[in-house]
Image: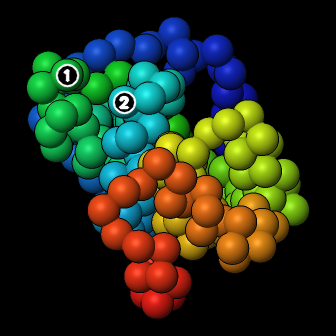
Amino acid sequence: MAEIDVFGPLSSLHWIDREKLHANDYNPNKVSEENLQLLTQSILTNGWTLPIVVRPDYTIIDGFHRWTVSGREPLLSKLGGKVPVVIVNHDSEADDIYGTITHNRARGVHLLEPMKAIVRRLIDEGKTVQEISKQLGMKPEEVFRLSDFSREDFLAMMTEGVTGYSRAAIYKKT
């Protein structure tokens, strides 16, 4: 394998029509619709922070899911049909495959205890369960499991300021 210019890809950063890109035929990474919605929310909240990595022929090496959501509203309109890309020029298709897999695997997984600390910190900062759920792509039940609150305290947080139904109905639902 030839020595890689580690600065090279970022020097090729530019916005192009998303329609020029196409998927590779080997990516084993699948994402649920729920996570695609979370990705969209992340882009809407943080802006586009990670370019799509492509070969010179615009085959996607990394960023297929970012490319996918860029074709949906509201991102399609907000981005004007463009996506940010960086181009890498590998010596072989095997190197492209290595790039796809290492990008996917390098992102890691979230560990339980650090996620609990994050949820607790957000709650301590006054964030609502609804906001945490939306911003982190979790169901309220996931926030509850990570919060270490008692069921009663969590239900009180969930229903704070809510009118229109009785607390007994809430307890009965679960």
Q: Position of residue 86 (x, y in %)?
A: 44, 24
Of labels 2 and 1, earlier in sequence is 2
Q: Position of residue 109 (x, y in %)?
A: 71, 61
Query: Looking at the image, which is closer to me, 120 or 118?
Result: 120
Which residue, given by chain and number where applicable, does mark 2 sit on? Answer: 44
- Report which quarter residue 123 is drawn in: top right
Numbered disc 1: secondary structure: helix
Taking 128 as reference, is 110 left or right? right
Residue 17 can be seen, yes or no: no
Identify which amino acid the numbered label 1 is placed on: Lys
Q: Are marks 2 and 1 in contact (CB under 8 Å)?
A: yes
Q: Position of residue 22 (x, y in %)?
A: 22, 46
- Report which quarter residue 79 is drawn in: top left
Q: Residue at x 35, y 22 (%)?
A: 84
- Within 10 Å of disc 1 (Cα), the crowding (few <14, some 14-19, many 20+) is few
Check the image and report above or below for 142 versus 117: below
Residue 109 can be seen, yes or no: yes
What is the image's colouring? Answer: rainbow
Q: Position of residue 1 (x, y in %)?
A: 68, 42
Identify which amino acid the numbered label 2 is placed on: Leu
Which residue, given by chain and number where applicable, does mark 1 sit on? Answer: 78
Q: Residue at x 50, y 44 (%)?
A: 131
Check the image and report above or below for 95 versus 141: above
